[in-house]
Amino acid sequence: MNDSGSDDALSDLACHLHARRKSILAAWREASERDPQVTRASALSRVQFHDRIPEVLDSFERKLSARRRADKEERAVEQQESAAAHGLHRWQQIVWKGVAAAWSRG
């Protein structure tokens, strides 16, 4: 398959994933709740899950849809920045939980 055909197939996959977003989120959430080894996902509230996981899916869909190399490189940078922002947000939540717990014991 040539590059154009591959790009079209990946773009079609991105469209398919986007169209099935609600069922993907529901299945992902249910699977994470059933799996006893998934502790981080179960620690997220339902609101946090539905706030953050769509960002992951958006980034994945954009990456699949990127047609030119420059677009792909730009999307890779966006994905890294998004992941870093998410990591910082989670770290801040953990720190503030610790601070709140310390104050409540104080």
Image: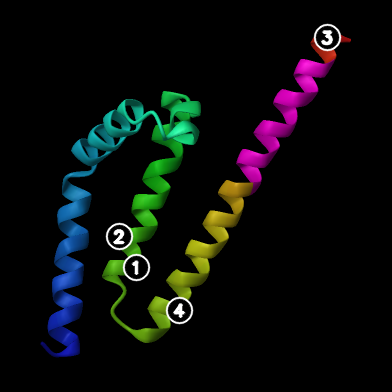
Could you tell me the amino acid type at mark 4?
Glu
Q: As drawn, which residue projects farthest toward the front?
A: 37
Count residues near mark 4 (Cα–Cα under 10 Å), then give few for <14, some for 14-19, many for 20+: few
> In the rendered image of this protein, does residue 33 appear above or below residue 74?
above
**What label does residue 73 carry, if any?**
4
Which residue in the protein does label 1 denote? Answer: 63
- SS class, disc 1: helix
Q: Look at the image and give the residue range highlighted in magenta.
A: 88-102
Of discs 4 and 3, which sits in the foreground?
A: 3
Which residue in the protein does label 3 denote? Answer: 105
For the residues labelled 1 and 3, the Cα–Cα distance comes to 46 Å
Answer with left or right where residue 19 lies relative to residue 26.
left
Q: Residue at x 28, y 79 (%)?
A: 67
Which residue in the protein does label 2 denote? Answer: 61
Where does residue 35 sit, x and y in percent of width and height? 34, 31
- SS class, disc 4: helix
Could you tell me the amino acid type at mark 1?
Lys
> In the rendered image of this protein, does residue 101 appear above or below residue 4?
above
Q: In the rendered structure, which disc, 4 or 1, sits on the residue that comes first in sequence?
A: 1
Could you tell me the amino acid type at mark 2?
Glu
Of discs 2 and 3, which sits in the foreground?
A: 3
